[in-house]
């Protein structure tokens, strides 16, 4: 049976001061009045039955998640007491879906992205499901067709086609964040895609692979799964989860799997507009520009300013600028950020300097 889990962890510090510890970026309703998590949840509505959809996120956000996604109940929120990177979120989803359905095939999805068109997303995901349903030893990743030589994304190189599955390929290799020259080479070759962070797996295959590649995680998940659905479930998660090794799914699972004779790593190219809403410049791109390239989600007036992003969480507040260029202004009720657009990555450093009660 098909299942899906949305990973909704992360603190979103590059989107401070709107993204806070109390309400992180994936729960901010700042994309046409909706959160990134609710958009991601709608994205899978035709692919997986409602009863088989999960969200893995910080336990502290359980109530916010349930308020944001009307169909979800407590049993389908996999609450992490602390973040332990993506392989443990994936293993958590695998352990719980396998306990319920030993033949579970599940998609791992992100809550950080805007993806369009929906039809292409659904086509690629359905192909991923069919690949694993036909052969549970397959681990499927999705490669976004690149549009520029990005140096901030990982890449996947396509190998030979998978027989019988048009549009699917063996994964030849994974490359983490190449320099500009290599990124230009990958783009020109046409054989590489951006690593999307989305996957389709057999839950049992993931757990068996982790027994070999990350036995500490596998052991912890066996304990969590055994307690799931009992009065000891929450206390078991709170005791075991913080002890798990912190590592990404790419390093802990996908890379060793690509060298393992018992497993087959496949890649499905996905030709979509894929926007990682992880920084203020990327968020600003979701807003329509005026004639001078200025963008806003509220009220803004500009005199002689160009390419200014003026952002607020209060639709009645007015931001005014004079003679600015390539600047981002973010205003909330208790904090204001002004940053050159080319230095927006440093916002996370500023967030770390803010008093804890204002983070």
Image (tube, rainbow, N blue to C red):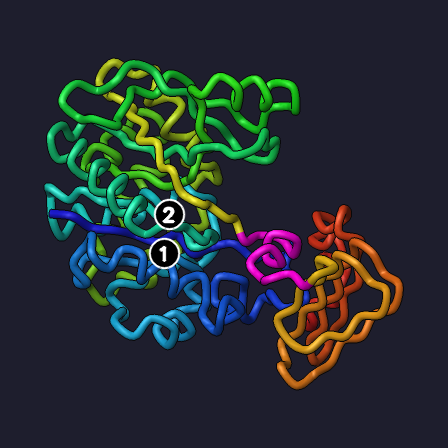
In the picture provided, is 320 more to the left or to the right than 86?
right
The outermost residue toward the bottom is 316
Queried whether the magenta region covers residue 36, the answer comes back as no
| Residue 359 can be seen in this image | no
Residue 307: x and y in percent read 75, 56
The outermost residue toward the front is 291
Judge by depth and name the residue closer to the eye, 137 or 312: 312
Residue 23: x and y in percent read 54, 70
Q: Name the residue: 68% across, 78% down.
A: 299
Q: Name the residue: 47% across, 53% down.
A: 112
Queried whether the magenta region covers residue 279, the answer comes back as yes
| Residue 47 in the image: above or below residue 32 | above
**Disc 2 packing (10 Å; few <14; some 14–19; many ≥20):** many
Which element type, helix, strand or loop, lies under badge 2? helix
Judge by depth and name the residue closer to the eye, 221 or 154: 154
Query: What secondary structure characterizes most of the magenta part?
Result: loop
Q: Earlier in the sequence, mark 1 or mark 2?
A: 1
Q: Name the residue: 48% across, 17% down.
A: 189
The alpha-carbon separation of the residues under discs 1 and 2 comes to: 6 Å
Q: Are marks 1 and 2 in contact (CB under 8 Å)?
A: yes
Q: Which span of residues is magenta-colored?
A: 277-290
Please tell me in which quadrant of the rendered image residue 58 appears: bottom left
| Residue 5 in the image: above or below residue 68 | above
Which element type, helix, strand or loop, lies under badge 1? strand
Residue 126: x and y in percent read 20, 42
* Quadrant of the frame with the C terminus: bottom right
Residue, disc 2: 89
Residue, disc 1: 56
| Residue 327 can be seen in this image | yes
Q: Name the residue: 60% across, 35% down.
A: 152
């Amino acid at each position: 049976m098909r299942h899906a889990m949305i990973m909704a962890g992360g603190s979103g510090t590059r989107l401070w001061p709107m993204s806070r510890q109390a309400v992180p970026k994936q729960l901010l309703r700042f994309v046409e009045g909706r959160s990134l998590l609710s958009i991601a949840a709608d994205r899978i509505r035709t692919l997986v039955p409602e009863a088989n959809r999960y969200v893995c996120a910080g336990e502290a956000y359980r109530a916010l998640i349930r308020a944001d996604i009307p169909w979800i109940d407590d049993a389908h929120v996999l609450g992490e007491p602390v973040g332990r990177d993506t392989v443990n979120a994936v293993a958590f989803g695998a352990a719980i879906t396998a306990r319920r359905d030993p033949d579970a095939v599940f998609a791992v999805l992100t809550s950080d992205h805007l993806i369009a068109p929906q039809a292409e997303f659904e086509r690629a995901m359905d192909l991923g499901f069919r690949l694993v349903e036909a052969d549970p030893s397959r681990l499927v990743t999705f490669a976004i067709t690149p549009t520029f030589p990005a140096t901030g994304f990982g890449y996947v190189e396509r190998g030979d086609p998978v027989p019988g599955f048009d549009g699917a390929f063996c994964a030849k290799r994974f490359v983490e964040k190449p320099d500009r020259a290599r990124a230009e080479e990958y783009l020109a070759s046409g054989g590489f895609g951006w690593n999307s962070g989305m996957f389709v797996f057999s839950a049992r295959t993931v757990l068996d692979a982790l027994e070999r590649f990350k036995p500490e995680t596998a052991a912890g998940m066996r304990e969590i799964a055994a307690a799931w659905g009992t009065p000891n479930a929450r206390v078991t998660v709170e005791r075991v989860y913080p002890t798990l090794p912190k590592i990404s799914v790419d390093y802990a699972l996908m890379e060793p799997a690509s060298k393992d004779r018992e497993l087959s790593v496949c890649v499905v190219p996905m030709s979509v507009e894929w926007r990682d809403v992880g920084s203020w410049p990327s968020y600003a791109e979701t807003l329509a520009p005026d004639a001078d390239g200025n963008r806003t989600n509220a009220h803004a007036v500009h005199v002689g300013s160009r390419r200014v992003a003026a952002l607020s969480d209060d639709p009645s507040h007015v931001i005014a600028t004079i003679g600015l260029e390539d600047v981002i202004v973010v205003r909330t009720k208790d904090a204001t950020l002004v940053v050159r657009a080319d230095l927006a990555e440093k916002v996370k450093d500023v967030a770390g300097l803010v008093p804890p009660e204002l983070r």
